[in-house]
Image: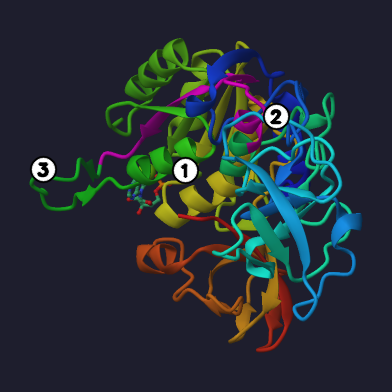
Amino acid sequence: MLEFEEALARVLAAVPAPTSECVSLRDAPGRVLVEQVQAPIDLPIFANSAMDGYAVRAADVASAKPASPVRLRLAGKIAAGEASSGEVTAGMCVRLFTGSPLPPGADAVVMQEDTHVDSHSSGQVLILAPVGPGGNVRSRGEDVKHGATLAQPGDIVTAGRIGLLAGAGLTRVHVGRQPVVGLLATGSELTEPGQPLAPGRIYESNRSALAVLLERAGAVPKTFPLVADALAVTSLALADAFNQCHAVVTSGGVSVGEMDFLRRAFEQIGGELEYWKVAIKPGRPFVFGRFRGKLLFGLPGNPVSALVTFLLLVRPALLRWQGATDVSLPAHPGVLAEPLANHGERRHFMRVKVDSTGKIHSAGIQASHVLSSLAAANGLVDVPAHTTLATGSAVTALRWEY
Ligand code: AMP
Ligand code: MG
């Protein structure tokens, strides 16, 4: 039986290097960059006003006070989007708005609230407060300098990064290709949701839930029909899925019972089994294998085991496949609001709910078939064997979003 860390390391070591494609920013969210992106321009691209106000020479207004304002001559107006024209010389000011280019000669902007326009003396502005050089000015390149690195290979394309890249005028990026992942559910008891249930049968739920997690991990799920518990059909289904996909995720049929055909079927089609036992709960039976440069992840059938082993062992592989550097679930350090007890022999990744204040609650009953606590959970806490973590313990929840 492998320790979790070794199981994960072996999966990651088997993942092929990312191949790249060029996509529009619109299609890039969640994708992984495989290139370093350099700023083609300065940001801001020109010095501009951070306020509605007046461009001035700071030295001209150093003595301005409400009781003894400085009077400046209004030489013009530059709206946002207009090019600046003319130079601001001593005793002059120019009306500006947020984003208006700072005209040459000016080195600061007095905000409108610190000014007074006298209706009797048109063309004059009273400045009521001083502003230091550079005040209320966004200087050229203060955000990003031309040539600076905007993003690194391995970065996930987030909304913020899309904003940065678009702001630099870029429209396309090179990202890792998304692996197409076949999804198979094995089990003669399984029925498609929406169909009538015969006695002894249950609804199949793993493919729907795993398809969501596959998409969240940037992979392209391809769902295959249900697979009955029989060696020949399991082999055929695996061969078909491997023909069409870069990796195959199966659920069920990986235990030691005589109705568990997954491992035998995989070996029958020529797959090489890497391991099939990991010392974690849920999910001791977890099959990892290779087939002609492609990967098999055989998850246990219990819905909780399937989802937890996916998050811990498959999600990292799919992210790495696309070139991601950080592949672990986001860690949330917090305090337990109630105890978590693991009486078992294996470390238990227990379902928890991180509330909006950051406190960590048990998500409910921890048995591997309990879907309600899975639905309530948004994280996992790794509880060592034979250990009870008391209320108030500092722990780290491994989070997922939805
Ligand atoms: P197995 O890993 O095949 O032994 O299945 C373990 C348990 O999970 C059994 O109770 C199965 O009925 C159940 N199960 C297996 N696959 C699924 C599935 N795709 N959806 C819902 N329950 C499943
Ligand atoms: Mg089964």
**Labels 1 and 2: the sequence-earlier one:** 2
Which numbered mark, 1 or 3, is in the foreground of this view?
Answer: 1
Q: Image height check: is 49 above or below 9? A: below
Q: Which residues are magenta?
A: 164-188
What residue is shown at x 67% (from left), y 26% (from top)?
33
What residue is shown at x 37% (from left), y 62% (from top)?
371
Image quarter (top left, top right, bottom left or bottom right) of the C terminus = bottom left
Q: Image height check: is 157 above or below 123? A: above
Give the label on residue 213, or none. 1
The amino acid marked with disc number 1 is: Leu
* Quadrant position of residue 177: top right
SS at badge 3:
loop
Query: Mark 2 highlights which residue?
Result: 85
* Quadrant position of residue 122: bottom right
Give the label on residue 185, or none. none
The answer to whether the beta carbon of the residue marked 3 is less than 8 Å from any atom of ligand 1 is: no
Which residue is outermost to the front?
120
